Image (tube, grey):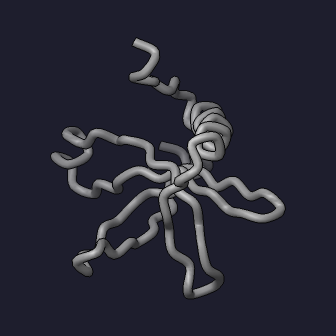
């Protein structure tokens, strides 16, 4: 491996669930409008076994709050979710050279 080759280093974010348990996610993509910020994330796996067994479901969420008080929430408006999901999944497909599988199309 040459020194010039790039190494992939994921953007990891820590989220606490309702029980206070820390869950690590990889930030795949971020999308900002004039008013809102949205993210596409997937569960982060760090062991070889977990990486192989992981499902890599992409989760689309909205960022609320500011600075240290940011938190992630579900997008409740169906039309907003569809629009943002299409934008973020297109960005993820281009960035990672993958194709999005939509279970509703089958």
Judged left or right of residue 11, residue 54 is: left
Residue 40 on image: x %, y %: 53, 50
Q: Say which residue appears at 48% left-offset and 58% top-offset.
A: 74
In the shown orientation, is residue 11 left or right of residue 36? left
Q: In the rendered image of this protein, does residue 89 appear above or below residue 74? A: above
Q: Is residue 86 left or right of residue 34?
A: left
Residue 17 spot, x, y in % from top left: 30, 72
Q: Is residue 7 visible?
A: no
**Can residue 29 be seen?**
yes
Examine the image and state in which quarter residue 66 appears. bottom right
- What's the residue at 69%, 53% (across, down)? 31
Q: Residue at x 59, y 72 (%)?
A: 64
Q: Residue 70 occupies which quadrant of the picture?
A: bottom right
Task: List the single residue furthest toward the left.
Answer: 49
How many marks can you see? 0
On screen, residue 16 versus residue 47, left or right, reads right
Question: Is the residue 14 above or below the residue 75 in the image?
Answer: below
The x, y position of residue 93, in whole percent, is 58, 32
Question: In the orientation shown, which residue stands out farthest toward the bottom?
Answer: 68
Residue at screen point 55% across, 36% down: 96
Residue sticking out furthest to the right: 34
Query: Looking at the picture, how far across and down is residue 12, in whole percent?
Result: 45, 65
* Quadrant of image for the C terminus: top left
């Amino acid at each position: 491996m040459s020194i010039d080759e790039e190494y992939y280093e994921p953007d990891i974010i820590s989220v606490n669930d309702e029980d206070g348990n820390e869950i690590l996610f990889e930030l795949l993509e971020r999308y900002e409008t004039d008013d809102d910020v949205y993210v596409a994330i997937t569960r982060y796996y760090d062991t070889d076994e977990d990486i192989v067994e992981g499902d890599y479901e992409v989760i689309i969420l909205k960022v609320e709050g500011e600075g240290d008080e940011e938190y992630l929430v579900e997008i409740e408006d169906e039309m907003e979710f569809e629009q943002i999901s299409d934008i973020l999944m297109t960005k993820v497909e281009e960035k990672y050279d993958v194709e999005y599988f939509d279970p509703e199309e089958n």
